[in-house]
């Protein structure tokens, strides 16, 4: 199995979370924002939704693909018990803590903004993603460790042979097309807490694992054919934009989603697979920022939406506020208070833990 770190995959995780923040901010400026529990601007920017509709067919599946790839790398030096404990600490603990202590914060801000009675309301909210990931880990542990045991077997050789051809990666889309034909989602991009989102995420997570497991053939294929996949995706998006008012038949959107993702993997492998100080910092920061960004976003919205300024300036102000304040909370609170780290998916400071133990022994 591969032993080196894939910096492009780390970058794609950072970029995908960044796009998620922008996407959530754009929702505030849509007329239907309150229907899904967001603070709503009185001045809509519906034009923002055109580029968002290009993103929303692949941004969440991409995150699940990347998570499956991360699962592959997490398995390299761990047995199943160690991996289960590591995933429990890194995923389940932040999910439970977020459910109890983080998602209620943006609900408090929402209630305060609309002068509603302040009521404690715990929910998965945007952390549904973590809940799904943990379930996938439980379900796929036996299969993935079986594949790891026979990593030089016929299945891997056959998978590598398929991925060595430009049509090979596109065959993945058949599973996603089958999913939408069976589940029949009303809205393709409605992933949160839906059966479509669950099964789509499950497929993306498992194929993320399999693509890295298959070896270098997949990466060489998407590197060589990245623009081919991108052109198909653009054609399908254009068709969706012109003919279907942004919501084409689900099987076409499933195929478009995979084409975008393959193109993104190819571009990332070409340009992003290199270490940097920025990546080293952001790859650690992005998970805690994902967990906290919603209450920061709602705080920014409650601050800037009442201002009598152009809505595009409000959008920019909320964006800057969300990114800046989330970064500051991470840097000066989460990153520096050791006992908070595991609650946000970070590792303890081992030197600090050893110091605590030494102090305790003295007493």
Image (cartoon, rainbow, N blue to C red):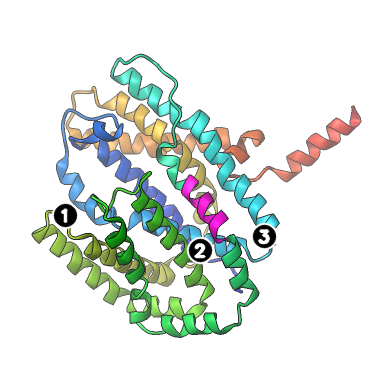
Q: Cβ–Cβ below 8 Å for labels 1 and 2?
A: no
* Vertical order, 30 against 171 (above or below): above
Is residue 289 shown above or below 52?
above
Labels 1, 3: front one? 3
- Residue linked to disc 1: 246
The residue depicted at 61 percent of the width and 70 percent of the height is 146
Task: Give whichever of discs 1 and 2 has the lower sequence position.
Answer: 2
Q: Main secondary structure of the magenta part?
A: helix
Q: To which quarter of the image does residue 80 belong?
A: bottom right
Q: Residue at x 33, y 81 (%)?
A: 167
Q: Quadrant of residue 175?
A: bottom left
Q: Position of residue 277 (x, y in %)?
A: 53, 55
Please name the residue shown 47% across and 39% down the image: 291
Residue 132 belongs to the span the image colors magenta: yes
* 43 falls in the magenta region: no
Q: Residue at x 30, y 66 (%)?
A: 177
In the rendered image, residue 44, in percent from the top left (x then y), is placed at: 16, 35
State the extent of the magenta-drawn residues as a range: 131-140
Please, is residue 93 above or below residue 34 in the view? below
What residue is shown with label 3? 80
Element at label 1 = loop
Q: Is residue 343 visible from the viewing direction of this image?
A: yes
Across and down, in percent, residue 155 comes to: 53, 80
Helix, strand or loop under label 2: helix
Q: Nearer the viewer, mark 2 or mark 3?
A: 3
Residue at the outermost right position: 362
The numbered disc on residue 69 is: 2
* Towards the viewer: 42 or 131: 131
């Amino acid at each position: 199995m591969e032993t080196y770190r894939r910096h492009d995959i780390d970058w794609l995780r950072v970029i995908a979370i960044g796009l998620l923040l922008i996407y959530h901010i754009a929702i505030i400026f849509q007329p239907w924002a309150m229907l899904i529990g967001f603070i709503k601007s009185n001045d809509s920017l519906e034009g923002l939704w055109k580029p968002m509709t290009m993103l929303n067919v692949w941004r969440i599946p991409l995150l699940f693909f990347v998570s499956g790839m991360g699962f592959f790398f997490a398995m390299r030096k761990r047995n199943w018990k160690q991996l289960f404990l590591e995933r429990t600490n890194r995923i389940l603990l932040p999910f439970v803590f977020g459910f109890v202590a983080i998602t209620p914060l943006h609900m408090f801000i929402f209630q305060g903004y609309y002068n509603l009675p302040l009521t404690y309301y715990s929910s998965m909210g945007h952390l549904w993603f973590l809940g799904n990931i943990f379930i996938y880990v439980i379900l796929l542990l036996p299969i993935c460790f079986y594949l790891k045991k026979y990593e030089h077997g016929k299945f891997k050789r056959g998978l590598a042979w398929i991925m060595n051809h430009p049509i090979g990666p596109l065959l993945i889309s058949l599973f996603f097309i089958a999913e939408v034909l069976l589940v029949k989602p009303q809205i393709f991009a409605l992933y949160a807490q839906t059966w479509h989102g669950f099964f789509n995420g499950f497929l993306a997570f498992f194929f993320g694992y399999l693509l890295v497991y298959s070896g270098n053939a997949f990466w060489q294929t998407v590197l060589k054919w990245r623009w081919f996949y991108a052109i198909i995706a653009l054609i399908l998006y254009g068709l969706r934009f012109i003919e279907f008012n942004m919501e084409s038949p689900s099987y076409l959107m499933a195929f478009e989603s995979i084409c975008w993702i393959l193109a993104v993997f190819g571009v990332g492998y070409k340009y992003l697979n290199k270490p940097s100080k920025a990546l080293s910092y952001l790859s650690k920061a992005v998970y805690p920022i994902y967990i906290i960004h919603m209450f920061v976003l709602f705080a920014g919205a409650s601050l800037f939406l009442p201002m009598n300024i152009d809505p595009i300036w409000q959008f920019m102000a909320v964006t800057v506020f969300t990114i800046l304040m989330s970064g500051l909370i991470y840097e000066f609170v989460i990153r520096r208070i050791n006992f908070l780290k595991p609650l946000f998916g970070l590792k303890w400071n081992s030197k600090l833990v050893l110091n605590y133990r030494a102090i305790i022994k003295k007493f």
